[in-house]
Image (tube, rainbow, N blue to C red):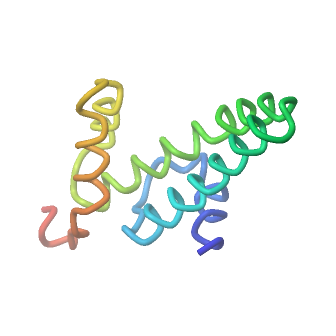
Amino acid sequence: MLEYYLLAFKNYINFEGKATRKEFWYFHLVNFIIIATLLLLSYLIIPYLVGLYWLYSLAIVVPNVSLFVRRLHDIGKSGWYWLLLLIPVANIVVWLIVGLTESKTMEEIV
């Protein structure tokens, strides 16, 4: 599970290629665990860790967008569809559709 999370950071500058559903979901699962832990620690135990949460949130932006674009390529869509995440209400629906859609083979894309 952690290897898929680290793979997203390894390919954070790569906006080409494809990302599997497994890579997409494991990345977001580990990301959720880290963010929940940081928030829990910062609000309940050590208030000074709020800065660490914000630093982590900023550090995760580019790998998250990169992974989302590669996942879009895997389902046969343009990478520019990631801009739909900027629409406040539609972003959850778009995120779920991209995460749950099966991968396309090269024959299906062409």
Callout count? 0
Would residue 68 be found to the left or right of residue 109 on screen? right
Spot the residue most to the top: 87
Q: Quadrant of residue 94?
A: top left
Picture layout, residue 4 above or below residue 90: below
Residue in the picture at 73% in, 36% down: 53
Q: Give the position of the C terminus as an image quadrant.
A: bottom left
Q: Residue at x 44, y 63 (%)?
A: 25
8 above or below 20? Answer: above
Q: Nearer the viewer, residue 85 or 79?
A: 85
Residue 12, percent across and down? 60, 49
Q: Which residue, as the protein is rendered here, is positioned at the far front?
A: 44
Report x, y in % for residue 10. 66, 59
Q: Nearer the viewer, residue 72 or 40?
A: 40
Residue drawn 58% across and 46% down? 63
Q: Residue 29 at what x, y percent from top left?
A: 52, 61
User: Residue 49: horizontal and vertical position, in percent?
Assistant: 83, 35
Compared across the picture, whether 25 is left or right of 96 comes to: right
Residue 7 to residue 92: above or below: below
Q: Is residue 14 left or right of residue 55?
A: left
Locate the N terminus by quadrant: bottom right
- Which residue is at a point 86% across and 37% down the rendered structure image? 46
Which quadrant of the view contains residue 48? top right
